[in-house]
Amino acid sequence: MPKRPLRALFILTFALIAVASPSSAAVLEVPTLSYPTIQSAIDAASPGDTITVSPGTYFETLTIQGMTDLSLVAAKIPSLVGAYSAGSFVTVPTGHPKINGSFNSGSCVTIIDSFFISIVGFEIEICDDAGIDVIGTGNPLSQDIEIHGNYIHNVGTAGVRLDQVYRIRVTSNWIENADNGITALAKGSLFADNHLNTATNYGIHTLDKSGINRVIGNSIGTSGIAGILDDGQGNRFERNTVSANFTTNIEIGLTASGSNVIGNAIFSVPVVNNGSGSDIAENQ
């Protein structure tokens, strides 16, 4: 008799482990009868799932809220192959599934209070707000988000906007024709190998109270005010190429402190340092 409760407990424990196992993760394909839109797949997704999106134009805006461990990827991820010359891009990336926000207001993709989310391989266009908007409103806030290999253009406030978030990776994206390329109120994040061009204001702007971010290896073309503006604390800017028709190429703002600006290629206008405790060295 005493063995039966133990056996039942073992069976229950095994069942719970099986339910929680990563092997239960699903791949949701768009478009299909089950998931005709990307948002319908997001709404049906569970932690660990991957949503694959076939080439085509999707006239919708997306919201990912309160979700964990979700990958949203192009079914066939195109490479961002192009040429950068004289402050502009001369080859436009093609082949991405396209998220078009022209029939909706707001940002094209909004991520709120979510964790371990990936957005990979999309073309994102025609939004009156940000192309991709990552927001933290609760406790804990949004963190561990990957934004990689997207072509974002003809959007409003920013190609990528981060607001009170942690450990975000924005890498190898192509962003042009926005008010700002990337704006970041973020900590512990990486912005690397992005191509940014034709921003009305800033290519990359790290805001006050953002800190310990790394901005590395980005190519920044024409912007109306500055290629890079740092208003944060302890941010590092390294091996970026900044050129073409700025008021300033790299500016350390009045609220900035402890910035590291090292080994950047800067054309025509030198670094402007209005901050405190900054290390500015070996920029050309």
Image (cartoon, rainbow, N blue to C red):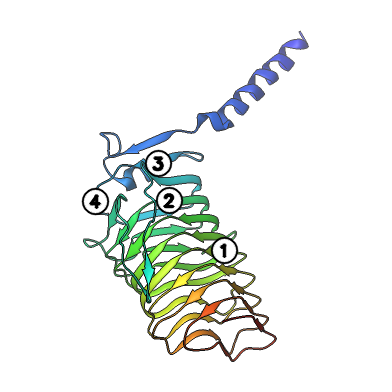
Label 3 to label 2: alpha-carbon separation = 11 Å
Residue 51 is labelled as 3
Query: CB of mark 3 within 8 Å of CB of mark 2?
Result: no
Tag 1 residue? 190
Q: Seen from this angle, which residue lies furthest right?
A: 2
- The percent position of residue 23, horizontal first and vertical second, equals 54, 29
- Residue drawn where x is 30% and y is 50% of the image: 95
Which tag, 1 or 3, sits closer to the chain's start?
3
Q: Name the residue under label 4.
A: 57
Q: Which of marks 2 and 1 is nearer the N terminus?
A: 2
* Spot occupied by residue 92 in the image (x, y as percentages of width and height): 30, 61
Quickly name the residue at label 2: 120
Out of 5 and 19, give the one closest to the viewer. Answer: 19
- Tag nearer the camera, 1 or 3: 1
Chain-order first, disc 4 or disc 1: 4
Residue 5 located left or right of residue 81 = right
The residues tagged by marks 3 and 4 sit, at their Cα atoms, a distance apart of: 16 Å
> Tag 4's secondary structure?
strand
Please, what is the three-letter code of the amino acid marked with disc 3?
A: Ile
Q: Is mark 3 on a helix, strand or loop?
A: strand
Q: How far apart are marks 4 and 1 (CA)?
A: 29 Å
Rendered image quadrant of residue 102? bottom left
